[in-house]
Amino acid sequence: MEQGTEEWEYEWEFVESGHWGGVKRTNFHMTDREAEVWWAYGKPGTRRLEETQRDRVAHKASLEPYRGLEPWKGGGLPY
């Protein structure tokens, strides 16, 4: 990918059946290319949430909340 190229990612909404089913949201972002291999992609009720659009290249996630939890350093969750 060239520098400055935008790659949009979105949260998705889907419908799950069964006892705990209903309309649900992914609560994480995926590009269209990633969503194409997702089990709910293309099924009735699945939709991309346009209002959650963000540029993956420009989005920088802070790793600060995860300091000390690196399992490869002997860390872990406090429970």
Image (cartoon, rainbow, N blue to C red):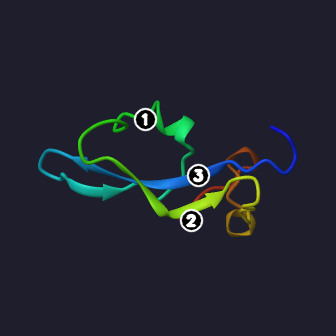
Does 53 appear above or below 21?
Answer: below
Amino acid identity at mark 3: Glu
Q: Residue furthest bottom?
A: 65
The percent coordinates of residue 31 (x first, y second) are 57, 44
The residue sitting at 68% across, 55% down in the picture is 75
The percent coordinates of residue 21 (x first, y second) are 18, 51
Q: Quadrant of the N terminus?
A: top right
Residue 78 disc label: 2
Label 2: element kind:
loop
Which residue in the structure is indicated by mark 1?
Answer: 38
Query: Residue 63 occupies which quadrant of the picture?
Result: bottom right
- Callout 2 crowding tier (Cα within 10 Å): few <14, some 14–19, many ≥20: few
Amino acid identity at mark 1: Trp
Label 1: element kind:
loop
Compared across the picture, whether 38 is left or right of 58 comes to: left
Mark 3 or 2, closer to the camera: 3
Which residue in the structure is indicated by mark 3?
Answer: 9
Q: Earlier in the sequence, mark 1 or mark 2?
A: 1
Label 3: element kind:
strand
